[in-house]
């Protein structure tokens, strides 16, 4: 969900802007310079300034007039009076997104390596995600994304039990894994498929088998 908004604020840019005539107070008064600004934000974090306006203001009656930044350049300090996160929040947000993207890429790569290892060194109980239409005769429509459980390793043969139902998208399969629906005794049909090791490797290379999950600790 996109949460965006905007706001504005006023900060003192120059406390002592000298003494000058005020048209309201009649007479010379000390002036200060205010900075009125507007900002926009996404998710409150990605914030940036959209408008700056300097106002020279009488400190006695608050009467003021807009001044060009160029006209008061010598009075303005080096530090921007607008809070850092209002000005540069978008940079911080961007840096966080980049870091998050990097972390996700690292995890995805790690998982890919794990899956390659699982296929290489299979263990009974491993849960394979695959397009079952390429593996089983039970599914005529392609694709049929679903699970198969490694039941046994007999010599060079991987023995799988095939899920009773499959999905047209991978999302449904992911849900079944997250919910551990495959632990239900009825989740798999009676169908057993034997695949030679080489074929399992090939199916993995072709992404017909696109993921493998292994329970590292079974309570
Ligand atoms: Zn005044």
Image (tube, helix red, strand yellow):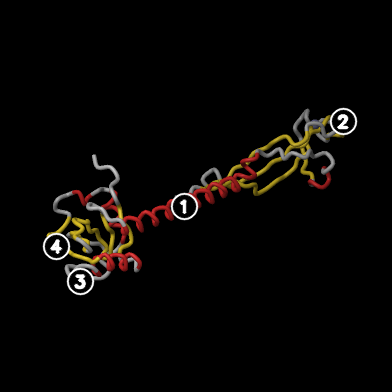
| Contact check, label 3 and label 1, Cβ < 8 Å | no
User: Mark 2 or 1, which is nearer the eye?
Assistant: 1
Q: Which residue is mark 4?
A: 191
Asked where in the image residue 135 lies, by quadrant, the reply is bottom left
Residue at image location 79% in from the left, 39% down from the top: 76
| Label 1 packing within 10 angstroms: few (<14), some (14-19), many (20+) | few
Q: Please, what secondary structure does the residue beneath circle 1 have?
A: helix
- Disc marking residue 28: 2
Mark 4 to mark 2 CA distance (whole Å):
96 Å
* Nearer the observer, 24 or 193: 193
Q: Residue 86: x, y in percent? A: 62, 42
Q: Earlier in the sequence, mark 3 or mark 4?
A: 3
Q: In the figure, is residue 187 to the left or right of 176?
A: left
The answer for how far apart the CA atoms under marks 3 and 4 are is: 15 Å
Q: CA distance from mark 3 to mark 1?
A: 37 Å
Give the residue drawn at x 25%, y 53%.
123
> Is 157 in front, or is 88?
157
Check disc 4 and report its element: helix, strand or loop. strand
Quick one: label 3, few (<14), some, or many (20+) residues within 10 Å?
A: few
Ligand 1 shown in quarter: top right
Q: In the structure shown, which secondary structural element does the residue marked by tag 2 occupy?
A: strand
């Amino acid at each position: 969900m996109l949460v965006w908004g905007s706001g504005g604020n006023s900060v003192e840019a120059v406390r002592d802007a000298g003494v000058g005539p005020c048209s309201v107070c009649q007479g010379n008064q000390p002036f200060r310079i205010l900075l009125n600004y507007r900002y926009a934000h996404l998710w409150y974090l990605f914030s940036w300034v959209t408008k700056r306006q300097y106002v020279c203001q009488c400190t006695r009656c608050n009467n003021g007039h807009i001044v060009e930044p160029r006209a008061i350049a010598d009075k303005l300090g080096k530090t921007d009076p607008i809070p850092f996160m209002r000005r540069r929040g978008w940079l911080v947000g961007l840096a966080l997104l980049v870091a998050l993207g990097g972390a996700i890429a690292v995890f995805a790569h790690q998982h890919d390596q794990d899956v390659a290892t699982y296929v290489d060194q299979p263990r009974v109980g491993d849960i394979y995600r695959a397009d079952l239409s390429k593996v089983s005769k039970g599914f005529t429509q392609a694709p049929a994304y679903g699970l198969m459980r490694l039941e046994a390793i007999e010599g060079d043969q991987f023995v799988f039990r095939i899920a009773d139902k499959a999905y047209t998208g991978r999302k449904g399969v992911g849900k079944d894994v997250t919910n551990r629906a495959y632990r239900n005794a009825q989740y798999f049909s009676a169908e057993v498929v034997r695949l030679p090791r080489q074929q399992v490797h090939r199916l993995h290379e072709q992404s017909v088998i696109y993921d493998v999950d292994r329970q590292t600790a079974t309570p």
